[in-house]
Structure formats: structure tokens, C-alpha cells
Image: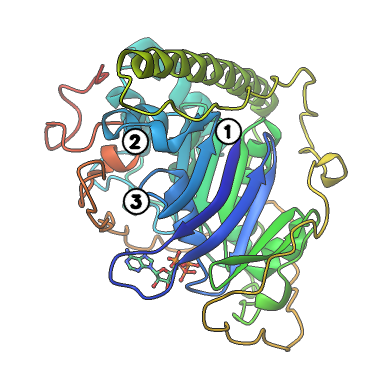
């Protein structure tokens, strides 16, 4: 699903790498937490998977594709197989909940009929079926994040990347968001989540990959947050009830459809990767001065066993061995010693009723700056559609995104 082979990432103008010789493999269906102190390289990992950044050294394979062989022009198509959720939600503030989710499908040219079926389904899955016509500023923070998750998964991605998705939420609301991500993972979507939330990681006991100074220092099958828990976590607010995620009786029907769609999307991606490999081989044969592309490993077989509807795959079937990664000592300046304070393990509340918190102001869309290194790099400022991988960088589009949207090939 994701493979980093000896990845080093050094940003221009810096004197030490953000990631230093990182080798990591994440298999289909896993739920992986990426933890580590601020600046340890978590977001850099996610940006590399998204191909927002290029590694300085090493190779990355995602969904069977060597990212080094994907041209800038094809990056948006590659990203259609990924869902991305950010800490600041990044909703379109002038569009309703329904339209925020539908927008993702409109820009990739899905039919009106498809959108009219898919959007209510996914809103049901995230527990917002009754709030489709609300505007983002009429929602709580947790609800806004659920819209963002709905938007990320409506296209049935095989892989969901989440960069601190609970960073702006209180503990009770965070627990609800995590329950939702667990259910999405149970439907077959692989989840890679960067987080500082010790309580969540400790509670879920999923695979944990810990970074210190750009190197993996721990890769545990059933991990807790570990020594990086220096960042204080809030106790649940008094009176904040647990969060109702999905109590709709049709929920399991929706999840069955979601599972089938993810399997289908993976099969489509495998076929696409094989076709692109064949095309690359033909192009290489036609241009003898270009060295042949390194051979890609055969795609892993598709899952043949349905996962249980209620429970995600438990770690005892996970393919990772505890503490299997023992990194070499970092050659760069030694990272600060791990804090010796005991790990905080706040108890997460059980899922149940929605919070009545006042809606926070919608976060403005973030414009992340990406350094330009050469012509192959993605442009510095990306629009939302570009950021979502739904439109080629630099491609013309209108202001609202409601007109002239469609497939870019
Ligand atoms: N665009 C950039 N240009 C230069 N340096 C960068 C850039 N992005 C990140 N870095 C540096 O790379 C290192 C890793 O940053 P990264 O954002 O990956 O860390 P992180 O673990 O996600 O941190 P946080 O938890 O605070 O988000 C840091 O030292 C950071 O300053």
C-alpha cells in the first residue's frame, strides 16, 4: 500500500534532513498512527505520500505505483485514490454540507445521478444525514470535521491520510471522530494518521510508528503513544457528552456498499498501475537513452475475505512485527532526550450523543507553500481542488467550482 525505501527528505535552505533514511511499509487495511514531537517529520511523510513533495533520496511506492515515475500532469489522477483530512477541516465556507461533499465528485466528472446517491450515503455514514443543507458555520467543530471526512471518503479511496484530524477538537468530539475513522478502516480503507493525541493512540492500540528527528525509533504493532507524550492532553470537559457518530439503522447497509466500493477501487488502481507500467516500458523501449524504470513489485492480491462489519481488523492479524525496526543512531545532531515523565493516558469517553458546543468560525482554507525545485515539482500555491488532487495544478477553473468542472482527461 505504502513503501518508503531509504527515504531522506531535506528541504531547501535547511541544514538537516526532515526525514533521514526512513524505510517503512504499510500494508492494505492497516490503521497506522504516525507519532512524534513537533518537527519530527510526520507531516513530511504525509506530503511525500501525497506527492506534494519529492524525496531527496530513496523511492516511494503508493498503491503499487512508484511515485518517482508519476509526472506532475498525472499527479491529480493519482491523488483521486487518496482521501486527505487536515486539522483545519478546509471546508468551502460558501457551500452547504451537501455541496462541500458533492464538489469532490463534480470536479472529477461524476454524473448527477451518481452524486445524488453517493452524497446522502456518505453523509449517513458520518452521521450528518439530517444536516445536509447546513452551512459550515452552522456546524460544531466535530461536525465540520465529519464533513471533511465525508468529502475525503466519498470517492471510496483505498488510502486515507489524516494530518492531526482531531487537533482542533475537544477530547469527547475527538473520540467520535476516531470511532468514525475506525469504521472507515473496517470498511477496507487503509488509514495513516499523524497525531499528537496521546490519549487516542493509547486507547486504540493500533500500529504506531514513532519519529524522532526524522528517523523511525519505534514501529509497534499494538502501540501506545510512548515517550513522546510530553504534549499535555486535555481532560474531557465537564458535561461534554460522548459523541453520536452513527446510529442510523441503515448504517451497515452503507458500510457494506463502502467496503465493496473500496475493493473495486483497489482493483481499478491495480489495473491502472499495470497499464501505466506497461506504457512506461513501451516508452522506455522507444527512447533508448533513458534508463529503464526499476521493476515494480507485483501488486498484492486483493482481499478475498470480508471484514467484520462492526469491528475493524484487530492487530493480532496485522502483518507488522512488534519492534521490528531498529534504526541506526542518527548521524545528525543528537535529538533531545525523550522526556521521562510518565505517559498520560486520558480515558476517552464512549461514543454517544452530539455535543451542543457553539460552532467555531470556519477555518480559512490553508495555502501551503511548496518549494519549487525544478520543472517537475507541483506549483507553490494549490487551489482546494488541486490540493484534493482533483484538478491538475495550474489548470484553469472558475471561482466557485460549480461550473465547467469535469474530468481533466
Ligand atoms: N517547506 C519546508 N521548508 C523547510 N523546512 C521544512 C519545511 N517543511 C517542514 N520543514 C522542516 O522539516 C522538519 C519536519 O517538519 P514536519 O512538518 O514534517 O514535522 P511534524 O512532525 O509534522 O511537526 P508538527 O507536529 O509540528 O506538525 C521540521 O524541522 C520543519 O521545520
Q: Is residue 191 above or below residue 406?
A: below
Q: Position of residue 315 (x, y in %)?
A: 82, 46
User: How many numbered dots are placed on residues in this image?
Assistant: 3
Secondary element at tag 2:
loop
Residue closest to the eye, 402 or 286: 286
Secondary element at tag 3:
loop
Do the residues under discs 3 and 2 have CB atoms within 8 angstroms? Answer: no
Query: Tag 3: Cα neighbours inside 10 Å, few (<14), some, or many (≥20)?
Result: some
For label 1, the residue is 125
Kindly identify the residue that appears in the image at 26 percent across and 48 percent down: 93
What is the CA distance from the residue labelled 2 to the residue labelled 1? 23 Å
Kindly identify the residue that appears in the image at 27 percent across and 55 percent down: 370
Residue closest to the eye, 351 or 21: 21
For label 3, the residue is 90
| Outermost residue to the front | 289
Sequence-wise, the earlier of marks 3 and 1 is 3
Q: Position of residue 128 (x, y in %)?
A: 50, 39
For label 2, the residue is 389
Ligand 1: quadrant of the figure: bottom left
Amino acid at each position: 500500500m505504502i513503501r518508503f525505501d531509504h527515504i531522506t527528505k531535506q528541504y531547501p535552505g535547511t541544514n538537516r534532513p526532515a526525514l533521514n533514511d526512513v524505510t517503512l511499509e504499510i500494508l492494505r487495511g492497516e490503521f497506522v498512527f504516525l507519532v512524534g514531537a513537533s518537527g519530527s517529520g510526520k507531516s513530511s511523510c504525509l506530503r511525500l505520500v501525497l506527492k506534494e513533495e519529492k524525496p531527496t533520496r530513496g523511492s516511494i511506492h503508493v498503491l503499487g505505483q512508484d511515485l518517482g515515475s508519476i509526472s506532475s500532469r498525472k499527479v491529480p489522477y493519482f491523488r483521486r485514490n487518496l482521501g486527505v483530512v487536515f486539522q483545519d477541516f478546509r471546508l468551502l465556507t460558501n457551500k452547504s454540507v451537501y455541496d462541500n461533499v458533492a464538489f469532490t465528485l463534480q470536479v472529477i466528472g461524476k454524473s448527477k445521478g451518481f452524486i445524488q446517491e453517493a452524497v446522502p450515503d456518505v453523509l449517513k455514514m458520518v452521521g450528518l444525514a439530517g444536516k445536509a443543507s447546513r452551512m459550515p458555520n452552522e456546524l460544531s467543530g466535530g461536525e465540520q470535521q465529519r464533513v471533511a471526512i465525508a468529502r475525503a471518503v466519498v470517492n471510496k479511496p483505498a488510502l486515507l491520510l489524516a494530518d492531526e484530524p482531531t487537533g482542533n477538537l475537544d477530547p469527547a468530539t475527538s473520540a467520535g471522530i476516531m470511532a468514525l475513522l475506525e469504521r472507515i478502516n473496517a470498511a477496507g480503507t487503509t488509514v495513516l494518521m499523524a497525531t499528537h493525541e496521546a490519549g487516542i493512540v493509547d486507547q486504540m492500540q493500533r500500529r504506531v510508528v514513532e519519529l524522532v528527528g526524522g528517523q523511525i525509533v519505534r514501529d509497534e504493532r499494538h502501540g501506545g503513544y510512548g515517550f513522546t507524550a510530553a504534549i499535555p492532553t486535555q481532560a474531557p470537559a465537564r458535561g461534554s457528552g460522548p459523541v453520536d457518530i452513527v446510529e442510523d439503522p441503515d448504517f451497515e447497509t452503507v458500510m457494506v456498499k463502502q467496503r465493496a466500493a473500496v475493493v473495486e477501487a483497489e482493483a481499478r488502481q491495480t489495473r491502472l498501475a499495470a497499464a501505466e507500467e506497461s506504457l512506461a516500458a513501451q516508452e522506455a523501449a522507444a527512447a533508448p537513452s533513458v534508463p529503464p524504470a526499476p521493476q515494480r513489485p507485483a501488486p498484492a492480491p486483493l482481499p478475498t475475505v470480508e471484514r467484520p462489519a462492526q469491528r475493524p481488523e484487530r492487530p493480532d492479524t496485522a502483518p507488522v512485527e512488534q519492534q521490528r525496526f531498529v534504526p541506526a543512531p542518527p548521524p545528525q545532531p543528537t535529538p533531545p532526550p525523550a522526556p521521562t515523565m510518565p505517559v498520560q493516558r486520558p480515558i476517552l469517553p464512549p461514543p454517544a450523543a452530539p455535543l451542543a458546543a457553539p460552532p467555531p468560525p470556519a477555518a480559512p482554507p490553508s495555502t501551503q507553500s511548496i518549494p519549487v525545485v525544478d520543472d517537475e515539482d507541483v506549483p507553490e500555491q494549490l487551489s482546494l481542488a488541486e490540493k484534493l488532487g482533483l484538478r491538475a495544478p495550474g489548470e484553469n477553473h472558475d471561482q466557485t467550482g460549480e461550473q465547467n468542472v469535469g474530468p481533466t482527461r
